[in-house]
């Protein structure tokens, strides 16, 4: 049986194509957008909701208002 050799470039390309996981995304929302951890937890519970919120943050200057109304 021949060994399977996987190059670092291929691993890096696969890693770059993976979506951001909920926990790191939650932490980033708290850090980058200044929202409370609870709000970030609710937003990242569903990918579609987190994507929507992040899309709104791109368009406005006060991301906190998007999370609370």
Image: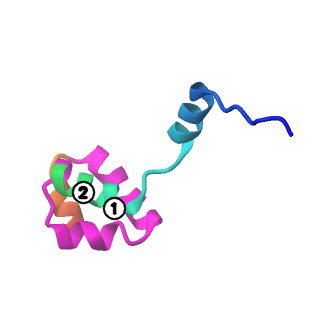
Q: Mark number for residue 23?
A: 1
Which residue, given by chain and number where applicable, does mark 2 sit on?
27
18 horizontally vs 6: left or right: left
Measuring from the top left, give residue 30's x and y in whole percent.
Answer: 18, 57
Can residue 68 be seen by looking at this rendering?
A: no
Residue 57 belongs to the span the image colors magenta:
yes
31 horizontally vs 41: left or right: left
64 horizontally vs 4: left or right: left
Residue 55 sits above or below residue 44 on the image: above
The answer to the question of whether label 1 and label 2 lie on touching residues, with beta carbons closer than 8 A, is yes
Measuring from the top left, give residue 47's x and y in whole percent.
Answer: 45, 64
Compare residues 29 and 69 and report the one nearer the observer: 29
Work out which quarter of the rendered image holds the N terminus and state it: top right
From which residue to which does the magenta span run? Answer: 32-60
Element type at mark 1: helix
When asked about the image quadrant of residue 39, the answer is bottom left
């Amino acid at each position: 049986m021949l060994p399977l050799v996987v190059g670092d470039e291929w691993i890096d390309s696969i890693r770059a194509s993976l979506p951001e996981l909920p926990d790191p995304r939650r932490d980033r929302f708290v850090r980058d957008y200044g929202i409370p951890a609870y709000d970030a937890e609710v937003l990242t519970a569903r990918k579609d909701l987190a994507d929507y919120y992040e899309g709104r943050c791109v368009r406005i200057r006060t991301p906190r208002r998007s999370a609370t109304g």
